[in-house]
Amino acid sequence: MSASAEDSTDETLMIRYQRGDRSAFAVLVKRYERPLFTFACRYLGQRDLARDVTQESFLRVVRRAQEFRHEARFSTWIFAIVRNICIDELRKSKHRRHLPLDERSDDRGAIAETIGSTQPAHDPERSAIGSRLEREIQDALAALPDDQLEVFLLRELAGLPFSEIAEISETSENTVKSRMRYALEKLQKALLSYEEQAKALR
């Protein structure tokens, strides 16, 4: 794999893949496998299913490679693919989303783990509070409506701008911002009990 491929933009790599450069696709997989899996895992709450969804997302990229427009952003395109597959899976299975504590993500924006990591390992009481906080936040995430959850994940885990999220979710940017605000308000409520207990330890 050449250094130039590693340094190329996603869009350039996709154009190269359209022209037959398989190594370019390998770089895209390397860049997006983790973010797509994390999104699917948090959205669906099932690790094995998230793996299948991630694999299917890349298979669709292969099958639809020639549909990619050169002026489009690759991140928008591929996250729209994984998001639509997740929606299809939820419709088929109609399962209750569950986010197990032992399947935490270390990606940017994984709030529960970020806060929990501030608890000293040698202090059992603080560790217990951190674990409880994480459980409350995981429950709060699982309870979010699908439209609010996907906006939160695309913003906080994938790091996408609101304009891209609006395109992916096929809605207006103002609607996306509104969904994000509602999601954050609900998550903030999950932090209230943690804050009260944390103050008691100061």
Image: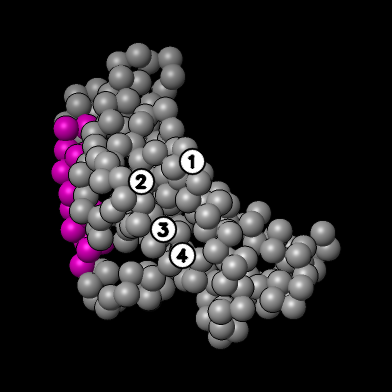
Q: Mark 4 near mark 1, Cβ–Cβ under 8 Å?
A: no
Q: On the rendered structure, is 141 left or right of 33?
A: left
Q: In x, y percent, where is residue 70? A: 60, 84
**Comparing marks 1 and 3, which lies closer to the viewer?**
3
Q: In the image, what residue type sits under mark 4?
A: Ile
Mark 2 and mark 4: Cα distance apart in space? 15 Å
Q: In x, y percent, where is residue 157? A: 43, 53
Which mark is first along the chain, 3 or 1?
3
Q: In x, y percent, where is residue 131? A: 32, 25
Q: In the image, what residue type sits under mark 2?
A: Leu
Q: Which residues are magenta?
A: 178-194
Q: Secondary structure at mark 4?
A: helix
* Residue bearing mark 2: 44
Mark 1 and mark 3: Cα distance apart in space? 23 Å
Depth check, front residue: 22 or 34: 22
Q: Which mark is residue 85?
A: 3
Which mark is first along the chain, 1 or 4?
4
Q: Is residue 146 above or below residue 52?
A: below
* Residue bearing mark 1: 106
Which mark is first along the chain, 4 or 2?
2
Q: Secondary structure at mark 2?
A: helix
| Residue 147 falls in image quadrant | bottom left
Magenta stretch: includes residue 80: no
Residue at horizontal 37 percent and vertical 76 percent from the top: 167
